[in-house]
Image (cartoon, coloured by chain):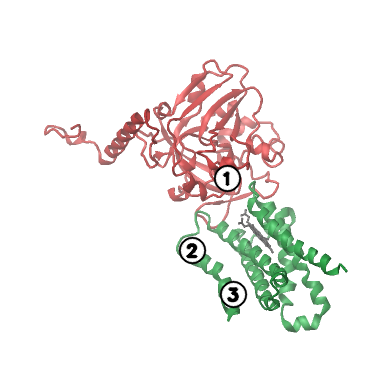
Chain colours: A green, B red
């Protein structure tokens, strides 16, 4: 029940984009709008995924883990939209320009790396895979820390001057990762 | 009273409706300005400017719609979000307003905005290329900056021209945050400033300049990236050494003094080879000097444009 609700809520950003594009509401530069919106929601879903563990510990609700996979997959879903927007709408399949961008533009390089790293995580997100890989599954999925750091860095490097927004995401990520370090430290203390 | 039509008037002498409207708006505007001596009201945006001449400065490309030109603006004095200035600058007061022209000149002068509006204004359609990789085609109203420079008579040691935007964090809330070094400063070499293409713009699309586009008066240098075109100017100073612009100060490796549109010199973080014309789907190739090479390239003959970016 709650899961279905969360699923529907997670589709709102896509619904909004669809609605706006059908009603001429994306502003003067629609492609930029879509790129930014899908990029923002990728990052938001990454951070939401990362907040499940701290929340579980803080409010003692272990069942929250049931929602983590869906949030992670939505991060991947919006990343796919974001990447497709870039390849299709922004660059219009100009492969040489795309390859050059990925190699030469640090912000694209880290964004691309983060996206590529998300693929194996999405591919191994099923329970069957989890059982199959066991400990290695955990190790593999720790990549999400790197991916999130890459996502924030990507944002930081692409803004022209006003770093307020990326700084807020960086702060949120620092808190989420900091919590894990602190928790580890405390739970190890005698 | 004035508008009663005597029976003996020839039909040809009857003022065309649109011109009449323009005049009437002008009269209303003038009345408002008269009142403004006592009350700081403002000429409302969407006031038509009268007596505009057509000019030879045209572009054989579709104009960017008025709505896009006035809702997609980089104007950090109001907001760093491009849809912000149209909303936040709505109540920006542009009266009273003066522009001081001084520094290395024989006749320093201060122009009231109403005096500037009395110059002979012409419509010029220019391309505008933003350093971020998008572009527009805009019908500006104004006159060559050189008209002003001729009046103040630069001295022999004047080599550069520095433009300064209004500094007033009360009226320009973006200036409350240290995003850039306020006030916004830009500069041109004297010959660039004297070039006939360099426009002192007071309007667009037949109207008084909307606040979000740099009201009441701004520069337009169409062969340079948009940020060189200083908005809401209060001071023009002739100087001997190159002014350090706000963007150069913010990121010297990314924004140079010249900032001529150049598809062969990338911004360190993104390519400048192509641009998205607002309203178009596919990107188009960026032209050297934004397509104004015939007129301006000679000013840079022999210069290494990769070094002087
Ligand atoms: C996990 C991976 C990624 C995340 C979290 C992410 C996140 C973001 C965010 C937050 C923004 C800025 C949104 C805004 O300005 O409001 C953005 C913009 C952008 N991203 Fe990504 N991104 C990712 C992957 C990629 C990839 C793979 C590419 C292309 C190869 C890419 C290309 C872009 C571009 C071109 C922009 C817009 C830049 C601009 O507006 O000037 N991103 N992304």
Disc 3 is placed on an element classified as: helix
Can I make out residue A112 in this image? yes
Q: Are marks 3 and 1 on the same chain?
A: no
Say above or below: A32 vs B187.
below
Rounded to the nearest angstrom, the CA distance separating label 1 from label 2 is 25 Å
Q: Position of residue B211 (x, y in %)?
A: 46, 41
Name the residue tied to disc 1.
B130
Which residue is drawn at the image coordinates 44% and 33% (left, top)?
B142
Q: Position of residue A148 (x, y in %)?
A: 72, 63
> B289 and B36: which one is in front?
B36
Q: Position of residue B296 (x, y in %)?
A: 58, 33
Q: Residue furthest left?
A: B7
Rounded to the nearest angstrom, the CA distance separating label 3 from label 1 is 41 Å
Q: For the residue carrying disc 1, how many other residues have a C-alpha within 10 Å: few (<14), some (14-19), or many (20+)?
A: some
Which residue is drawn at the image coordinates 13% and 32% (left, top)?
B6
Would you identify the image quadrant in which residue A5 lies?
Answer: bottom right
Disc 1 is placed on an element classified as: loop
Name the residue tied to disc 2.
A20
Disc 3 CB within 8 Å of nearest ligand 1 atom: no
Residue B246 vs residue A17: left or right?
right
Of marks 2 and 3, the one in the foreground: 3
Name the residue tied to disc 3.
A6
Would you identify the image quadrant in which residue B141 lies?
Answer: top left
Badge 3: chain ID:
A
Rounded to the nearest angstrom, the CA distance separating label 2 from label 3 is 22 Å
Q: Are marks 1 and 2 on the same chain?
A: no
Disc 1 CB within 8 Å of nearest ligand 1 atom: no
Mark on residue A27?
Answer: none
Which quarter shows the N terminus of chain B? Answer: top left
Can I make out residue A96 in this image? no
Q: For the residue carrying disc 3, how many other residues have a C-alpha within 10 Å: few (<14), some (14-19), or many (20+)?
A: few
Badge 1: chain ID:
B
């Amino acid at each position: 029940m709650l899961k279905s609700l969360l699923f529907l809520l997670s589709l709102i950003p896509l619904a909004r984009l669809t609605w706006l594009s059908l009603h001429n509401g994306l502003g003067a530069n629609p492609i930029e709008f879509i790129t930014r919106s899908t990029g923002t929601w990728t990052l938001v879903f990454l951070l939401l995924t990362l907040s499940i563990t701290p929340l579980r510990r803080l409010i003692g609700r272990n069942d929250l883990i049931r929602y983590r996979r869906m949030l992670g997959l939505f991060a991947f879903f919006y990343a796919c939209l974001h990447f497709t927007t870039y390849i299709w709408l922004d660059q219009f399949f100009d492969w040489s320009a795309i390859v050059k961008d990925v190699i030469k533009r640090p912000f694209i390089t880290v964004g691309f790396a983060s996206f590529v790293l998300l693929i194996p995580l999405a591919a191994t997100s099923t329970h069957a895979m989890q059982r199959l890989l066991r400990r290695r599954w955990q190790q593999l999925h720790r990549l999400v820390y790197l991916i999130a750091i890459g996502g924030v860095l990507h944002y930081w490097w692409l803004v022209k001057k006003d770093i307020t927004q990326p700084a807020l995401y960086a702060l949120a990520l620092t808190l989420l990762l900091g919590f894990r370090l602190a928790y580890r430290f405390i739970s190890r203390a005698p | 009273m004035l508008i009663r039509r005597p029976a003996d008037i020839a039909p040809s002498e009857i003022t065309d409706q649109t011109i009449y409207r323009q005049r009437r708006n002008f009269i209303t505007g003038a009345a408002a300005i008269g009142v403004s001596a006592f009350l700081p009201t403002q000429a409302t945006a969407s006031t038509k400017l009268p007596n505009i001449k057509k000019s030879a400065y045209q572009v054989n490309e579709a104009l960017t719609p008025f709505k896009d030109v006035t809702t997609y603006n980089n104007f950090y004095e109001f907001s760093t979000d491009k849809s912000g200035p149209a909303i936040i600058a709505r109540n920006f007061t542009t009266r009273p307003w003066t522009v001081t022209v001084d520094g290395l000149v024989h006749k320093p002068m201060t122009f009231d905005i109403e005096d500037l509006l009395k110059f002979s204004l012409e419509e010029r359609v220019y391309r505008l290329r933003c350093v971020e990789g998008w572009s527009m085609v805009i019908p500006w109203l104004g006159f060559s900056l050189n008209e002003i420079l001729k009046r103040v008579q630069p001295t022999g040691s004047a080599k550069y021209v520095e433009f300064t935007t209004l500094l007033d964090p009360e009226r320009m809330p973006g200036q409350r945050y240290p995003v850039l070094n306020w006030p916004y400063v830009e500069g041109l070499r004297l010959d660039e400033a004297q070039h006939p293409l360099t426009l002192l713009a007071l309007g667009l699309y037949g109207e008084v300049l909307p606040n979000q586009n740099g009201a009441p008066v701004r520069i337009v240098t169409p062969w340079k990236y948009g940020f060189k075109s200083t908005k809401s100017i209060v001071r023009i100073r002739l100087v001997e050494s190159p002014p350090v612009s706000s963007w150069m100060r913010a990121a010297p490796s990314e924004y140079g003094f010249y900032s001529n549109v150049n598809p062969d010199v990338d911004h360190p973080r993104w390519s400048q080879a192509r641009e998205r014309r607002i309203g178009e789907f596919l990107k188009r190739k960026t032209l050297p000097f934004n397509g104004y090479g015939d007129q301006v390239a000679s000013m840079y003959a022999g210069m290494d444009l990769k070094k002087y970016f």
